[in-house]
Amino acid sequence: MTRVPDIGPAPVLALLLGVFNTGLYLFVRGTAGVRVLFVGLAAILGAFAGQAMALRLGDPLQIGDFGLVWSTALSCLGIILIVAASTLSPSRGSQGQ
């Protein structure tokens, strides 16, 4: 019988924080279309990367060992990068004109 490995709180809290920041972005933006999948993924991965930075650099606001400030900052940075990339990319309607 194989034992299921334990999951730490960081991936779960990064998922919750990324989904919350994605929802906040959708509330401000109004609509995002298909882009919301990429925004959500970038927000979750950014929150997880922010947790790794918080472990190394320290964080003034923590929930247990989860650094909330760094996770939120990198989650928002991930959202900003996806929005900037989608804004700068050519639209489907313009075919080399």
Image: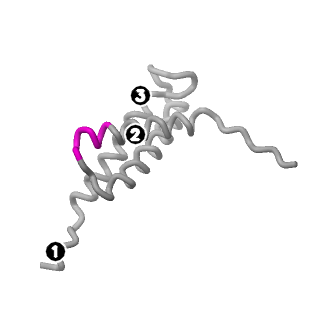
Mark pair 2, 1: CA separation? 33 Å
Horizontal arrangement in the rendering, residue 69 relative to residue 2 (left or right): left
N-term-proximal mark, 2 vs 1: 2
Neighbourhood count class around disc 3 (C-alpha, 10 Å): few under 14, some 14–19, many 20 upward: some
Callout 1 amino acid: Ser
In the displayed orientation, state which residue is furthest to the bottom.
96
Q: Which mark is residue 94?
A: 1
- Horizontal and vertical percent position of residue 50: 46, 37
In the displayed orientation, state which residue is furthest to the right.
1
- Horizontal and vertical percent position of residue 59: 47, 24
The residue located at (22%, 72%) in the rendering is 92
- Horizontal and vertical percent position of residue 70: 43, 32
Quadrant of the drawing holding the C terminus = bottom left
Q: Secondary structure at mark 3?
A: helix
Callout 2 amino acid: Leu
Snapshot quadrant of residue 93: bottom left
Closer-to-camera residue (7/80): 7
N-term-proximal mark, 3 vs 2: 3
Against 89, residue 76 (above or below) is above
- Horizontal and vertical percent position of residue 2: 84, 48
For the residues carrying marks 2 and 1, which lies nearer the camera in this image? 1
Horizontal arrangement in the rendering, residue 36 relative to residue 8 (left or right): left
Closer-to-camera residue (9/66): 9
Q: Which mark is residue 74?
A: 2
Horizontal arrangement in the rendering, residue 4 relative to residue 37 (left or right): right
Residue matched to label 3: 69
Callout 3 amino acid: Val
The residue located at (40%, 48%) in the rendering is 40
Against 69, residue 79 (above or below) is below
Name the main secondary structure of what is drawn in magenta.
helix
Q: Secondary structure at mark 2?
A: helix
Against 96, residue 14 (above or below) is above
